[in-house]
Image: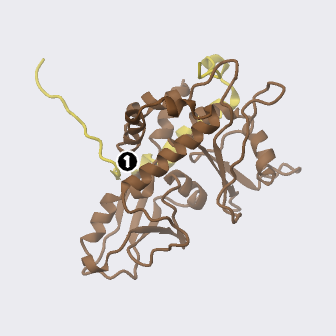
Chain colours: A brown, B yellow
């Protein structure tokens, strides 16, 4: 029988099989073969694609190469969202491998942040962790950590070291039994049908009468259209790490076990496939 | 401190069983046919050889 610790491993070791193809308008000296990789769901595109960059640079002249960026079916992919979120939001219910187009020119400044080095990803990741801890513990845990502890979280993610990461991250997941959970749950709700990037508000894991809030309670307040309508028809899928937890799942448990390494629970609301 | 919602297997709630099952299905769907693909992040693996 599985236990809760196995969920942490399953989440960490989730992979998306991906096929990278060079954009056909790029100038190359010879034909560019596609490149296949298993991408960690919990990491960031620009952090794990050095091999892709090298592979395509081999067939290109240096003067034809600008900053690399990625596209899926016309949508530029935001490297600052976790890979699993990008996949669940844009490509779930499609055939694997995930087919991503690689670009080296015409960087879409309006859609994407530049990512000149890994230190930009590290800064983004650490600021998410700090924001999450401000919500969970008024920043008390992250502020009590030393610089080397912050580095341990980042290096754990960068080098795919589960034990190294969780030895430190477990401190960010603690709470007192009398509280029954975090102060607020760090979450983000993404919808493809909305212009705003995501919903993020204050929401407590425990209700005023002391009962545990569920995933359904959160959605009812933040995005009621995501819930099945009165006829019980499911118009949307509520996806976290590629799975659909039941709406009665306690939010505190989800936050502890299905959060990304940035300590946010990323929830994707996608239309139910019709076929 | 922490993990206050853990329960023994005999009492495993339906919502939790659902998560375990779906994670297994996810592995089958997303990984089992693609294990020959290269990993994006190399793990340095130390293989100890020799006689005891």
- A46 on left or right of A224: left
* Foreground of the two, A221 or A5: A221
Q: Position of residue B28 (x, y in %)?
A: 49, 44
Question: Mark 1 — residue?
Answer: B35
* As drawn, B20 above or below A39: above
Q: Chain of mark 1?
A: B
Q: Position of residue A106 (x, y in %)?
A: 44, 78
Q: What is the quadrant of the N terminus of chain A in the image?
A: top right
- A156 on left or right of A236: left
- B49 on left or right of A211: left
* Foreground of the two, A248 or B2: B2
Residue under the point 59% across and 40% down: A132
Q: Secondary structure at mark 1?
A: loop
Residue under the point 69% across and 53% down: A199
Q: What is the quadrant of the C terminus of chain A in the image?
A: bottom right
Query: How would you rate the neighbour count of disc 1 (Cα within 10 Å): few for under 14, some for 14-19, many for 20 or more?
Result: few
- Is residue A239 at all visible to an observer of this figure? yes
- Is residue B25 at all visible to an observer of this figure? no
* As drawn, B23 above or below A120: above
Quadrant in the picture for residue A61 = bottom left
């Amino acid at each position: 029988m599985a236990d809760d610790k196995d969920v942490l491993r399953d989440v960490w070791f989730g992979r998306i099989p991906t096929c990278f193809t060079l954009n056909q308008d790029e100038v190359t000296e010879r034909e560019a073969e596609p490149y296949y990789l298993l991408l960690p769901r919990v990491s960031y595109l620009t952090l794990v694609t050095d091999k892709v960059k090298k592979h395509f640079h081999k067939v290109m002249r240096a003067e034809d190469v600008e900053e690399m960026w990625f596209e899926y079916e016309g949508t530029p992919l935001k490297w600052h969202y976790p890979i699993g979120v990008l996949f669940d939001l844009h490509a779930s219910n499609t055939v694997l491998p995930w087919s991503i187009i690689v670009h080296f020119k015409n960087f879409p400044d309006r859609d994407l942040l530049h990512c000149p080095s890994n230190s930009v990803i590290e800064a983004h990741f650490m600021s998410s962790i700090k924001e999450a801890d401000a919500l969970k513990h008024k920043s008390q845990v992250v502020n009590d950590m030393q610089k080397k502890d912050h580095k341990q979280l980042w290096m754990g993610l960068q080098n795919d070291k589960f034990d190294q990461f969780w030895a430190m991250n477990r401190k960010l997941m603690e709470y007192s039994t009398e509280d029954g959970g975090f102060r607020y749950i760090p979450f983000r709700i993404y919808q493809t049908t909305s212009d705003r990037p995501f919903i993020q508000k204050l929401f407590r894991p425990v209700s005023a009468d002391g009962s545990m809030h569920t995933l359904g309670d959160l959605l009812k307040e933040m995005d009621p259209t995501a819930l099945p309508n009165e006829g019980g028809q499911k118009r949307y899928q509520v996806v976290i790490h590629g799975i659909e937890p039941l709406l009665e799942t306690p939010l505190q448990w989800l936050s502890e076990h299905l959060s990304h390494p940035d300590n946010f629970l990323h929830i994707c609301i996608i239309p139910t496939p019709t076929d | 401190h922490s993990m206050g919602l853990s329960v023994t297997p005999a009492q495993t709630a339906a919502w939790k069983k659902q998560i375990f099952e779906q994670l297994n299905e996810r592995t089958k769907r997303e990984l089992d046919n693609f294990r020959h693909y290269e990993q994006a992040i190399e793990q340095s693996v130390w293989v100890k050889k020799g006689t005891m």
